[in-house]
Amino acid sequence: MELIRGTNIDFVKARRIGYWISAGLLAMSIISLVAHGGPKYGIDFAGGTLLQVRFEHPVRVEEVRAALGGVGYARATIQSMAGGNEVLIRVPEYEEGGGTPEVVKEALRTSFADNPLETRRQEEIGPKVGRELRQQGIWAILFSMLGILIYMSWRFQLASGTAAIIALFHDVTITLGIFSITGKEITLPVLAAFLTIVGYSLNDTIVVFDRIRENIRVFHRETFGTVINKSINRTLGRTVITSLTTLLAVIFLFLVGGEVIHDFSFALIVGVVIGTYSSIFVASPILYEWQIRRGEKGKTGRKR
């Protein structure tokens, strides 16, 4: 069943509105990243200690911070969970000889002597390992982009591959900027979400580009802009339904999935929205601009 059918929206004419929206989002993202000195890396990439501690009775974040400040960990990130009974503690500095988790737990036991606690989760990563993971993550994204460019250029043409890559950089940069604006950390699960966003956005773009290629043969007397409009309109129902069902799933994960996948699902929510938008208002308009600026008429006859 198609929820959206028979639309005749002039997406090519509206592309300049998309340019302004994208420029604004990219500007905010870049400004935030520069102002914060780059992305905020979690202990997976920066090194440090993560502890999830459950108390028998609720505790306040201020009390936990005061306890850790007394042993030199005033900069620790503390987050209350489970109605105040659990706290998630992130200590960015990692001591080579170990001892950080024990020092933190002992400080908590001393300060909350009448409130028993148990350790629910404990992770430690050294700074060298963190740097290596960060470099590997960056290379993973870059190699995936290169593979996508080669695939798109082989399946369609270089113009399509270039448009798809620009759209993907657009999606990743904006998602990274939103993480910077909201103060969220980049961790391994978030990196996995970024790679998922790349795949999701690319899938939408391929569907549109495939329809454009088919319609070039069918509407060979029409302008290239008309072919793009027809292609996007005819895939719009599929795009909206797919995006909505995916979005509902990740929103549900975000709301009830728990703290462990909270940032992962948040990245997917942003990525699904931005990826759907970019396949229509970034990738396709870039392909259109490429064609008309090079004066390539192909099988579409005259330029728009």
Image (tube, rainbow, N blue to C red):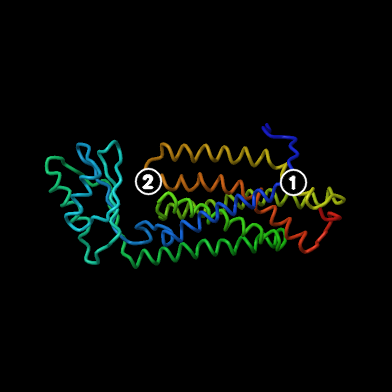
Q: How many marks overall?
A: 2
Which residue lies under the disc numbered 2? 260
Image quadrant assignment for residue 142: bottom right
Depth check: give the residue in front, 56 or 169.
Answer: 169
Q: Secondary structure at mark 1?
A: helix
What type is the residue that disc 2 sits on?
A: Val
Depth check: give the residue in front, 270 or 147.
Answer: 270
What is the CA distance from the residue labelled 1 to the residue labelled 2? 40 Å
> Horizontal and vertical percent for residue 80?
29, 42
What type is the residue that disc 1 sits on?
A: Ser
Which marked residue is nearer to the observer: mark 1 or mark 2?
1
Q: Describe residue 302's horizontal placement relative to residue 22 as left or right.
A: right
Q: Is residue 233 above or below residue 303?
A: above
Q: First in sequence: mark 1 or mark 2?
A: 1
Q: Describe residue 62's horizontal placement relative to residue 14 as left or right.
A: left
Which residue lies under the disc numbered 1? 231
> Horizontal and vertical percent for residue 285?
70, 53
Q: Secondary structure at mark 2?
A: loop
